[in-house]
Image: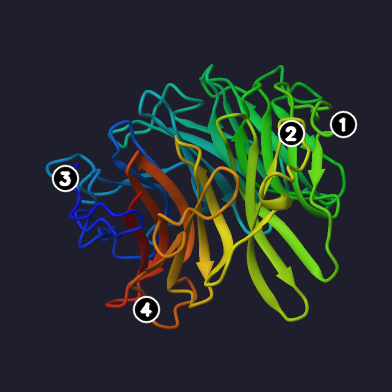
Amino acid sequence: MQPAARAVPGDIDTSFGDGGLARYTLLPADYHARAVLGPGGEIHLVGTSDIDPTALIHGRLDADGGIPAGSALRECARHTLVPGQTLSNVRCAMQPDGKIVAFGGYGSFADSHPFFARIAANGELDVSFGEGGVVVIPDLWGRMVQNAGVAIQVDGKIVAASSGFTPDHEEMSALIRLEADGHRDAGFGERRNGIALEKRGNTTFYDLLLGQDSNILVCGFAVGGASVLSYTSNGMPDEGFNNDGITTIPYKPGRYADFSAITLQPDGSVVVAGDAREEEPAAFMGIMVRVDKTGQIDSAFNGGEVILPKPLAGCRDVQVLADGRIITLSMSTLGEEHAGVGCWLPDGRPDFTFGNQGHVIVELPTETGSPTRAFLDDLLVQTSTRLLIGCCTAAPEDGIVSPILARLII
């Protein structure tokens, strides 16, 4: 990577892309993609495009936001996974060997199911995975509505989480685990079919994380509030986590909250972040809570919760740095074309050495009035001093939606 022009925490790194911003522009149609970092800091973009809704599309930027010169990926790699079926809602994870596992839905709005695919670093499907590089789960969901992510265990097994409706219109969530070669894990789930269903009330998963004790953590909404759920390594509720595997943040009068992102501190404590909405006055805020390894809300973390100060709003992602500091990516009260990045000490206090009193606002170039502007997705720690934020926006010059990334000094 090139040296940064400035090294003040919170500054835009102008050595990245064009003045600190990089947009992927090789497709002449809307391209909704999520970002994942390769072993060398290169940026892989995996998602779908209006140019061919049945194809999984993989593009790449180098570590400094440029199109790799002479690369086989100078143009996007496209793969039709399930012939005739539209793909949607794709998320991805990077394996240690540089292969990318994509997880999403295939089918129509009314009839959709999960799929997995594995892509080599050069953009080709890994035909050793599943059947020709693809695994489909046709017996889960009548309609898949939420993709909570995918993660790679240290033994190479693949875990994913999603929510949806059964063919009988019952709403629930599920974990899926595959062997490293794409076969379902026959030791996972109540029926040992690679699927663990969460049936306790209306539960929606939004994000997935692997814990330090071989447990699987998800966050979202469950049993009436913003929740963190823990499962054992075989997919069963973790009774060592708040007795029943669920910690729900108590309601406060006139306030509703849910969690959209989850991360771990070095001691195994769980940090979750999301939205808090107040009825009077009507307001959207960002919220962050810490839960210890036993599922108890940690009152030492800023008294139990952090409410993000304006102009920061609802959180979309959260990460922990190697030194224990916490980074949040949020919307902004200044408008949908702005992204807010906050930096917090390990105990939840603002890190006043970062930006303006612990936060910065990044303005994203976008078409005025676009309904997809600043659709925030990803917060990626590229190095110990570089932080990437990723989203999809409509370009001002042509209105085409495409991934855009910004790099900050940390």
Which residue is under mark 3?
2
Percent of width and height locating residue 154:
52, 20
Question: Where is residue 318 shown, x and y percent of the image?
Answer: 54, 49
Determine whether the residue tagged by mark 4 lies in a helix, strand or loop.
Answer: loop
Disc 4 crowd rating (10 Å Cα; few below 14, some 14-19, many 20+) is some
* Residue placed under numbered mark 1 in the picture: 243
Q: Residue at x 53, y 55 (%)?
A: 350
Amino acid type at circle 3 is: Gln
- Mark nearer the N terminus (4 vs 3): 3
Disc on the earlier residue, 1 or 2: 2
**Which of these two is toward me, 145 or 268?**
268
Residue at 20% x, 47% y: name it.
74
Q: Quadrant of the N terminus?
A: top left
| Distance between mark 2 and mark 4 Cα atoms | 41 Å
Residue at 81% x, 34% y: name it.
245
* Count of all numbered marks drawn on residues in the image: 4
Residue at label 4?
367
User: Is residue 195 in view from this perspective?
Assistant: yes
Secondary structure under the numbered disc 3 in the rendered image: loop
Number of the front mark, 1 or 2: 1
Q: CA distance from mark 1 to mark 2?
A: 10 Å
Q: Residues within 10 Å of mark 2 (few under 14, many from 20)?
A: many
Q: Residue furthest left?
A: 70
Residue 90 percent across, percent down from the top left = 51, 48
How far apart are the alpha carbons under marks 2 and 3? 41 Å
